[in-house]
Amino acid sequence: MYGLAGEKRKRVLLENMPGFLAASLNPWLIKAKNNPERLAFILHRVTGFIIVVYLLAHVIVTSYSTNPTQWEDIMSTFANSLFNKIGEWIVAGAVIYHGLNGIRLLLVEFFGTGIGKPELPKPPYIPPSLKGGQRTGLYIVFALSIIGWMLAGILIFTGRLF
């Protein structure tokens, strides 16, 4: 790369900008320090994948309900096993987080809640959305998800809430 006067310019790579190709192939590779939006993005994708896998498995297992002997065999395999309870707990956590974060995204994208005022980017770049209500909303979603997941775990593993 050469500048106006022919001097050679050095290419500067920023930590949070891996390049178009790397970002388009795997957006999870983009690292941004102290950015809860990135964590929320990754968790939203992972929990969505967990929910889709669960729904596909549920449809496949439910398709055996037409044959009573196969249905009883499958249900006896899954009934009261620790693997089943752990799977239910993971799916419950995924549904809780995905649902709460989805509500937060609806509020942000459709109603503009928590979005800061536009401003010129100055190094170190901190998005305006992370300075106000957006960050608070993310932390509320994280906290409610953890509380809900713990309550779901108590209910799943003990059979009663309190």
Image (spheres, rainbow, N blue to C red):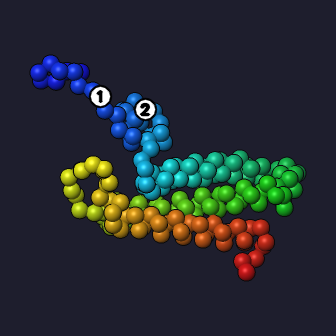
Query: Is 96 on the left-hand or right-hand side of 5?
Result: right
**Label 2 environment density (alpha carbons within 10 Å; few <14, some 14–19, many ≥20):** few
Which disc number belongs to residue 70? none
Residue kind at label 1, given as amino acid type: Arg
Q: Secondary structure at mark 1?
A: loop
Q: In the image, what residue occupies the spot 59% across and 60% down?
A: 95
Q: Quadrant of the C terminus?
A: bottom right
Type of residue at label 2?
Ala
Secondary structure under tag 2 reads: helix
Q: Looking at the picture, how far across and down is residue 111, in whole percent? A: 31, 66
State whether residue 88 appears in this view. Answer: yes
**Residue 28: x, y in percent?**
48, 42
Q: Is residue 78 left or right of 45 when viewed as pictured?
A: right
Residue 59 vs residue 138: left or right?
right
Check the image and name the residue furthest to the left.
5
Residue at the spot of label 1:
11
Q: Quadrant of residue 138?
A: bottom left
* Direction front: furthest residue: 7
User: Where 56 falls versus 76 (above or below)?
Assistant: above
Q: Residue furthest bottom?
A: 162
Residue toward you, 116 or 156: 116
Please give the residue where the numbered disc 2 appears in the rendered image.
22
Residue 100 seen in this snapshot: no
Q: Residue at x 63, y 66 (%)?
A: 149
Residue at image position (55%, 61%) is 97
